[in-house]
Amino acid sequence: MTDEILMGELTSALSCQSGMKIHINYAEKLPGGDINEVFKLNTDNGLLFLKMNDAHNYPDMFEREFMGLETLSATNTLSVPRPLATGRSGGKVFLVTEFMEKGRINPDFWENFGANLSRMHRHTQQHFGLPQANYIGNIKQYNTPYSSWSVFYAFNRLQPLTREAYDRQVIDKQMVTQMETLWKHLPQIFPDEQPSLLHGDFWSGNYMVGSDGRACVYDPAVYYGNREMDLATARLFGGFDTRFFFSYQTMYPLAEGWQQRIGICQLYPLLVHLLLFGGSYYNSVKDILDNFN
């Protein structure tokens, strides 16, 4: 981040897109960042957050994330970092958002979190999907609109990742056959329900306690889908109190039989993690498919 050209282009993009004159004093590289390089920017207008990645491989990654954050913010439900600028500098694409300061958890944190997620899920549209593809991590997420959730889930979620996993030789032909059998049965598994606006990558690593003591979510993979997807992902990796799920269920009860569909919904995030990290995720996918077949 010592590249003067990059710093200059970031300053220009920020000032132009935010409508304020912003000067970056210095950048501090932050830990983590499995997918992106992440930095804290010290500016004359306060702290900002910067993400960067390779422009050749992911030219529209942050443009899509910018739109996702704007979409979530427009619901006035869950708090998200305000997106400020996105663009390209040399071989890098970047996204700048406000820097979310951590706070102390409110006594009603979990109840409020569950209730606000349920309110976000009530935002709907006619079809499942989005007009454009986006990303989950650094994996392309296809959002071709369909009127049926079962068709959408098969063609846009399970099928593309199954094909990619097989091509990379991280799953075998038997697992492909099990997947094919499953997605043929999806219409009998999922009841009809209207599309819900989803965060799309709703696990404990993508929320924090904000300065107001309430939940702030980030790193979205937004689309309109079956709301059980966000809740199944939340259950997959832990980090959510039972009060969160009780509050959600009280505000917006799930369709009957949702408990039996948790594993089917978790197949997608598990396939994502299998492609990104390999290892034990193979066995997790296999266990779900074995239980179904």
Image (cartoon, rainbow, N blue to C red):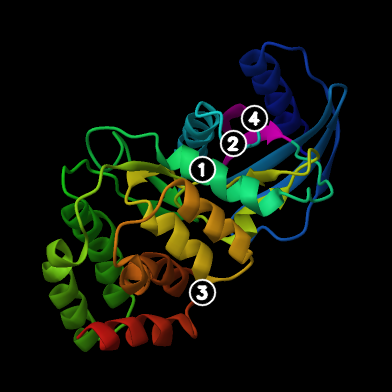
| Mark linked to residue 90 | 2
Name the amino acid, label 1. Ala
Say which element carries label 3.
Answer: helix
* Apparent side of residue 192 relative to residue 205 in the rendered image (left or right): left
Residue contact between numbered discs 2 and 1, judged by CB atoms under 8 Å: yes
Q: Residue at x 78, y 44 (%)?
A: 213
Q: Label 3 to label 4, Cα distance in Å?
A: 29 Å
Mark 3 vs mark 1: which is more N-terminal?
1
Residue occupying image coordinates x 70% and y 16% = 15
| Image point (78%, 53%), residue name | 30
Can you see residue 54?
no
Q: Position of residue 113 (x, y in %)?
A: 61, 48
Secondary structure of the residue carrying numbered label 2: loop
Residue topped by disc 3: 277
Most foreground residue, 125 or 40: 125
Magenta-colored span? 82-98
Name which of mark 4 and mark 1 comes first in the sequence.
Answer: 1
Give the residue type at disc 2.
Gly
> Marks 3/1: CA distance?
22 Å
Lateral position of residue 69 relative to residue 223, left or right: right
Residue under pointer 4:
82
Residue corresponding to mark 1: 55
Residue at 73% across, 12% down: 20
Mark 3 or mark 4, which has the lower sequence index? 4
Q: Nearer the viewer, residue 115 or 199?
A: 115
Q: Nearer the viewer, mark 4 or mark 1?
A: 4
